[in-house]
Image (cartoon, coloured by chain):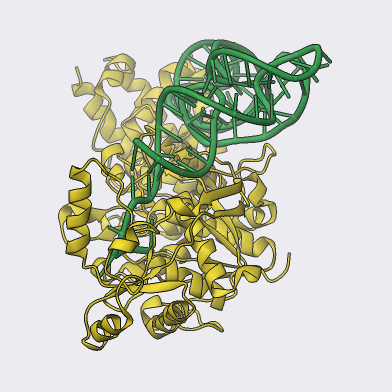
Amino acid sequence: MKNVRVRFAPSPTGPLHIGGVRTALYNYLFAKKYGGTFILRIEDTDQGRYVPGAEEYIIESLKWCGLVPGEGPGFGGEFVPYRQSERKAIYQKFALELVSRGEAYYAFDTPEELDFYRKTEAEKGNHNFKYDNVTRQEMKNSLTLPAEEVNRRLDAGEDYVIRLKVPENETVTFEDLIRGEVSFQTNELDDKVLMKSDGMPTYHLANIVDDHLMKISHVIRGEEWLPSTGHHVLLYRAFGWEATMPQFAHLPLILKPDGKGKLSKRDGAKFGMPVFPLGWKGDTPEDNFDGFREFGFLPEAVVNFLAFLGWNPGTEQEIFSLDELCEAFSIEKISKSGARFDYDKAKWYNQQYLHAIRGETLAEMIRPSLESQGYKVSADYLAAVCDLMKDRLTLLPDLVTQAYYFFTDVHTFDDQNIVKRWNAESRPDFEALTTALADAPGFDAASLEEVVKNFMEARNLKMGQVMPVLRLALAGTMKGPAVYEMMEVLGKERTVGRLQKAFDYFDTVK
RNA sequence: GGCCCGUUCGUCUAGGGGUUAGGACGCCGCCCUUUCACGGCGGAAACACGGGUUCAAUUCCCGUACGGGCUACCA
């Protein structure tokens, strides 16, 4: 495939949600697979919904995921600007061209009039009023009004919109790369507004004009756009651009975990999971969200998880780096039906990536949150702890909650288990063992194991009598890494100190 | 309501005219083990329904049901 140019075209109306990230991902993968270009275009034509900071958020999110655009705002490119609000004049010119070709027309009906019209129609039992090839004949537009009046209204600066003049009695058919042939009857299609009365284009116009001008080869977008694709094809025709029209691929939606509707930002709070890549601070507390990053996900895991929500390579490989995904990706393997958001699966992916990570790398990721909690540790020490813990983690913050005792004194003891493992006669043995440990030739796991084993043999003690007590004394809990390794990482001083202190405490537990 | 799209284990999915319908998550059991995890092994678990077409249909066609999307001077 040559000259693949795809775009991700979000609207800066708030944080980019995870479905958007997946759309961006699939566009990116497709571009990379064929050596093409991944373009970011900001569709900010609705000034009413514009949210400051949203564009920066989108870019930061894409970067976090490793999906860096080849062209876009801040990324340069042949077709600047990539922000639609800065391309207003272009759309006006093309809209006027459509009017002069008779493919579009001026309409003067105000939103209030339209509302009123819709309401009265509804009262008459007609609940699906459309501004279309039949109703336009009784509305106020350049098709029904005399030319002089149209000019008079235009000259007087009256508000107007430009609408697409959808042809009658035709069938629009196009080939969707995912769904196959899809067709619409033009009589079912309404005369979509192309230019709003504020002089801004609607999505439909801006989208077609920009995709054409920016030489977009494939439009990969969410399924919510499928119903308006009929209009889009009509628009390409009206402009005479049908020969170079991009190919369409409509992605299945990401659904709520319970399958009832598409995933929305409210679902994060409802299901206790992230639905945004990065955290977002809105104006109200309800508008503040933690993202996958804040929950403790690695971007590679999020990307891998997202890639598999609606696509799979057809092999049994589950773990893919971004590069591997680029290589394996194909539109034909995208599924047709919506995929529920499966948070357990997302966590599993994270766990897999955490297992594979190097202790040092993990250490640097976790350090900021550790320091914010007041723990200060050396790089080597932290890396050693990470190596011990990483097989036990699902989310990054688990390290601090599960292994806090590597960074400070044990503050919570599992008394129930202490009672089971410790009694009045235990003390002499464990004091002797502590001394033996303190005198160990080396404080590495292997030496310690030997010391403990010799000790047990000499005193005729069993593994189950000794190990749990040591573990309880060092960590306070029955869970955790191997005892010898824990001691090695903790070091002689801390190990011995903790044991002595713990035994005093154990004597008091009933 | 209208239009469009969809439907394989609970979930994500592979597959495809004749298969013991495969994998992964989750769940259960066993093994490993000083604990918790990891890991290994095993288990329960699916072709929405009805008609065609065919020697044969879960697979192709048509309906129905169900689900989802769209139905704005939002994207």
Closest to the observer, A440 or A276: A276
Q: Residue at x 49, y 20 (%)?
A: A456
Which quadrant of the rendered structure holds the N terminus of chain A? bottom right
Residue A267 falls in image quadrant: top left
Q: Residue at x 46, y 37 (%)?
A: A392
Question: How many numbered badges does the structure rendering display?
Answer: 0
Q: Residue A417, image x and y in percent?
A: 31, 19
A179 relative to A501 in the view: left or right: right
Q: Residue A435, image x and y in percent?
A: 40, 33
Q: Residue A84, image x and y in percent?
A: 40, 76
Q: Residue A291, image x and y in percent?
A: 34, 53
**Chain A color in figure:** yellow
A128 relative to A366 in the view: left or right: left
- Visible in this render: residue A477? yes
Chain displayed in green: B
Closest to the observer, A494 or A243: A243
Which quadrant of the rendered structure holds the C terminus of chain A? top left
- Visible in this render: residue A438? no
Residue A273 falls in image quadrant: top left
B56 relative to A345 in the view: left or right: right
Q: Residue furthest front?
A: A146
Q: Residue at x 33, y 48 (%)?
A: A407
Q: Residue furthest bottom?
A: A155
Closest to the observer, A190 or B46: A190
